[in-house]
Amino acid sequence: MDDFLNRMLEAERAGAKALVVFMDDHPRQSEAWKVLRAIQNDEAHNCALIGKLLEKAGTPYSHATGEFYEKAVALQGARERIQYLVRGLKWAVKRFDEALPTLGPGARDVFASMRESHLRSIAACERVLQALPR
């Protein structure tokens, strides 16, 4: 489980950092910017939640940033970046689904909540994509 927690921590950290970059693709306080800011806030909060699980388990937590970050910020264009973000969020949901049956009650609750948050983020990104010019 410790490997899973650290891998998810690295992935959430990568998402949070990439979203800060992605927000610059949109005018501050625009609808797209607000959506990305909310998702970034969720990703950063998830890092804290996973950190607490690792702390409770007495496991050192990773300080690395997942590979998603470098790939995400290398993309050009708001549409491409948000599409990549959606793929990353779906990847995380799949990892959560695989792990949920194996997690203890506390971790299961945290990841079930993160799963729901990611599904909301995917839906919000899809709405932003519909509004962006092609």
Image: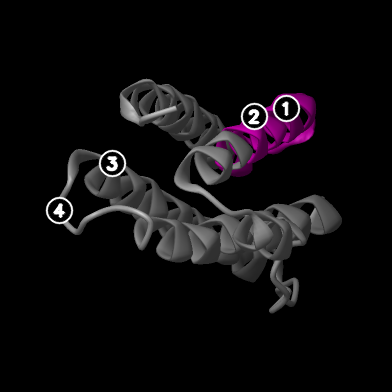
Q: Nearer the viewer, mark 4 or mark 2?
A: 4
Question: Secondary structure under badge 1?
Answer: helix
* Earlier-in-chain disc, 1 versus 4: 4
The quarter of the picture where residue 53 lies is bottom right
Q: Nearer the viewer, mark 2 or mark 3?
A: 3
- Residue at left 51%, top 40%? 82
Residue 48 can be seen in this image: no
* Earlier-in-chain disc, 1 versus 3: 3
For the record, the magenta segment spans 85-108
Label 1, label 3: how far apart the Cα atoms are: 25 Å
Disc tally is 4
**Placement of the C terminus among the 4 image quadrants:** top left
- Residue at left 79%, top 31%? 102
Q: Nearer the viewer, mark 1 or mark 4?
A: 4
Label 2 crowding class (10 Å Cα cut-off): few <14, some 14-19, many 20+?
some
Q: Amino acid at mark 2?
A: Lys
User: Would you name the residue on which mark 3 appears?
Assistant: 32
Residue 88 can be seen in this image: yes
User: Would you name the residue on which mark 4 appears?
Assistant: 29
The residue sitting at the left extreme is: 29
* Earlier-in-chain disc, 4 versus 2: 4
Q: Nearer the viewer, residue 31 or 100?
A: 31
